[in-house]
């Protein structure tokens, strides 16, 4: 059995890529930023932090055979993907652009206020599907601090027909991956369990947490390989995003 490995990525070590007048802070090599030590994590191709001043746009395309998840942290965004209807996104909302056979134009714009968001680029299990988009609205915070599934490529994660779910169904992905969120009160913890053959990538969106006595501050990340379970403890109220992806 391979040994469990946890690799910490500090916020100050993130790269910077440029698109027009927009600067992206990147966990993995992207656009004009190259880093052979940080190419991807499993099928997670990119994680980018994006800050848009009021009235500014981030545009990309054409893009194909990638699933782009955009989670809004602050402010509001409007997503415009080819001929799909435009979607206005508020804090906590999640938007999926599944490019499949190809999308020519992908545009995210800040409205009246500046906006902060995180984008996750995932490689699908099969190429050349029909392009699509989907939105999951923010859900109310709960007190239990558990990881809650925002998007999933596992059919078993979708609530059964007739089941009452207060926060709605996960966005359906075309890769066997999950994106999850946890909001932890001070001194509370959460356990996450997965199956063999998975990689995990955890980002501290806000707050301050510990994992196995290792401290992670706001903006830090932890990559787990050969790890089927971990426990995270909040030292102050913290918001976490976690991707569970195939190890490739």
Image (tube, rainbow, N blue to C red):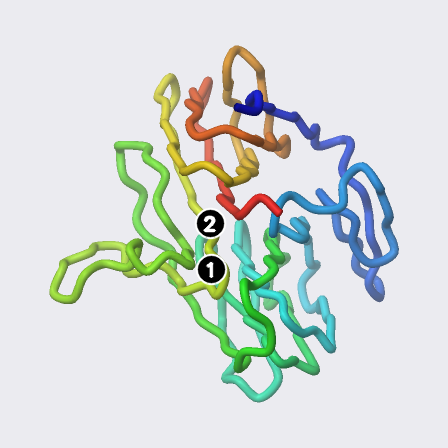
Q: Residue at x 57, y 88 (%)?
A: 83
Q: Between residues 69 and 79, which one lies in front from this camera angle? A: 69
Up-down relation of residue 101 to residue 178 (above or below) = below
When asked about the image quadrant of residue 237, the answer is top left
User: Residue lying furthest front in this view?
Assistant: 1
Q: How would you rate the neighbour count of disc 2 (Cα within 10 Å): few for under 14, some for 14-19, many for 20 or more?
A: many
- For the residues labelled 1 and 2, say whether their Cβ atoms are less than 8 Å apart: yes
Percent coordinates x, y for residue 105 in the rendering: 69, 80
Would you call the spot at circle 1 few (<14 residues within 10 Å), some (14-19), or many (20 or more)?
many
Of the image marks 1 and 2, the number of the one nearer the N terminus:
1
Element type at marker 2?
strand
**Does 191 appear above or below 214?**
below
Residue drawn 57% across the image and 21% down it: 3
Front residue of this view, candidates 182 and 77: 182
Query: Given the current orientation, which residue lies at the most extreme bottom position?
Result: 83
Q: Which residue is mark 1?
A: 94
Question: Furthest-left residue in view?
Answer: 162
> What residue did someone put label 2 on?
179
Q: Residue 240, how many percent across, how many down?
A: 48, 37
């Amino acid at each position: 059995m391979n040994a469990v490995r946890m690799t910490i990525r500090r916020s100050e070590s993130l790269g910077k890529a440029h698109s027009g007048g927009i600067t992206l802070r990147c966990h993995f090599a992207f656009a004009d930023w190259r880093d052979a030590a940080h190419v991807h994590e499993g099928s997670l191709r990119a994680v980018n932090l994006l800050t848009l001043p009021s009235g500014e746009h981030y545009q990309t395309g054409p893009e194909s055979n990638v699933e782009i998840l955009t989670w809004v942290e602050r402010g509001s965004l409007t997503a415009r993907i080819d001929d799909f209807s435009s979607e206005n996104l508020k804090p906590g909302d999640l938007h999926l652009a599944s490019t499949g056979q190809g999308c020519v134009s992908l545009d995210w714009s800040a409205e009246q206020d500046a906006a902060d968001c995180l984008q996750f680029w995932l490689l699908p299990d099969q190429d050349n599907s029909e392009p699509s988009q989907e939105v999951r609205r923010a859900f109310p915070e709960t007190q239990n601090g558990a990881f809650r599934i925002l998007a999933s490529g596992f059919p078993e994660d979708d609530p059964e027909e007739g089941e009452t779910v207060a926060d709605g169904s996960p966005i359906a992905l075309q890769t066997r991956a999950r994106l999850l969120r946890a909001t932890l009160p001070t001194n509370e913890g959460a356990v996450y369990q997965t199956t063999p053959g998975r990689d995990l990538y955890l980002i501290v969106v806000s707050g301050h947490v510990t994992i196995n006595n290792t401290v992670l501050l706001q903006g830090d990340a932890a990559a787990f390989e050969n790890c089927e379970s971990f426990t995270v403890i909040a030292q102050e109220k913290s918001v976490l995003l976690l991707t569970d992806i195939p190890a490739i």
